[in-house]
Amino acid sequence: MSGPVEHYTFPPLEAATPEGLLAVGGDLSSGRLLSAYRRGIFPWYSAGQPILWWSPDPRTVLYPGALKISRSLKKTLRHRGYRVTSDQYFSDVIQACAKPRERNDDSGTWITPEMIKAYTTLNESGYAHSLEVWDQMKLVGGLYGVAIGQVFFGESMFSHSTDASKVALTALVRIISEKKFQLIDCQVPSEHLFSLGARNIPRARFSGQLQAALAVESQPDTWNYSFDSLDLL
């Protein structure tokens, strides 16, 4: 680890702009990233920009018990024959998340090479985790994020096949429910997340819930899970 978490300082959350921008600069060392997450802060910037640190108000969260499995997702789980693994191909997942979402989009995404390196280091030390969704031998979806205490901080997901990212999230909820996690930090809103049960809450409430969930220590480790999609119904 790059120094104790307490070594890294950030402005108070209330100093963020209306858009949620809190700080600029610094680095993506493991210590700084973990310190940021523990305070409810995350990096989000594009190539060519300095590192931007955010704490938006409101905050988008998903409580494990609030996951919505739609009729169409149930159909996918029953009939598509997906298989889900965890922490088996972290590099492949983050690389897939980093690719432009549209074929004609050559602008790239916010997942820069330095971010890939930083989160790969967190994965190697047991803090960052990936879920992989397979159709036969082909990786068709997945997600990655960071686990500290009883919180999973979701970073990004991708889908190359019907409902694959939703299947990954469903498997994530199964895993963190087993581990007694209290919430998933989704960071920023999207209709995709709302359709799965996510909601917005005030930043102050999120901060209080975050600190309570972080008070329960969990040891960083590798997640060794494997599910058939039918197991997730």
Image (cartoon, helix red, strand yellow):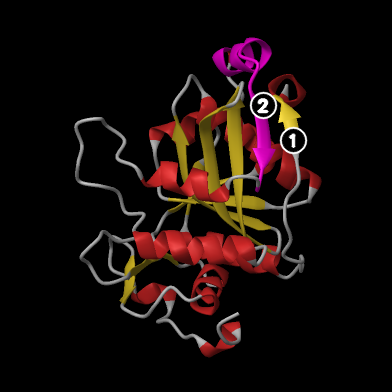
In the image: residue 126, left or right of residue 179 = left
Residue 68 locus on image (x, y percent):
60, 28
Residue 154 locus on image (x, y percent):
53, 50
Asked if residue 44 is among those painted magenta in the image, a careful observer would answer no
The magenta stretch spans which residues? 72-87
Does residue 79 show up?
Answer: yes
Marks 1 & 2, CB-CB < 8 Å contact: yes
Q: Residue at x 38, y 65 (%)?
A: 114
Q: Residue at x 67, y 63 (%)?
A: 126
User: What kind of element bears circle 2?
Assistant: strand
Q: Is residue 82 above or below residue 75?
A: below
Residue 34 locus on image (x, y percent):
56, 72
Q: Residue at x 74, y 61 (%)?
A: 221
Q: Which quadrant of the rendered structure holds the N terminus?
A: bottom right
Three-letter code, disc 1: Ser
Q: How many marks?
A: 2
Does residue 200 show up?
Answer: no
Q: Residues within 10 Å of mark 1 (few under 14, many from 20)?
A: some
Residue 64 or 77: which is nearer the viewer? 77
The residue wearing badge 1 is 226
Asked if residue 80 is among those painted magenta in the image, a careful observer would answer yes
Residue 228 locus on image (x, y percent):
73, 24
The residue wearing badge 2 is 83
Three-letter code, disc 2: Arg
Q: Residue furthest bottom?
A: 7
Between the C-alphas of marks 1 and 2, the distance is: 7 Å
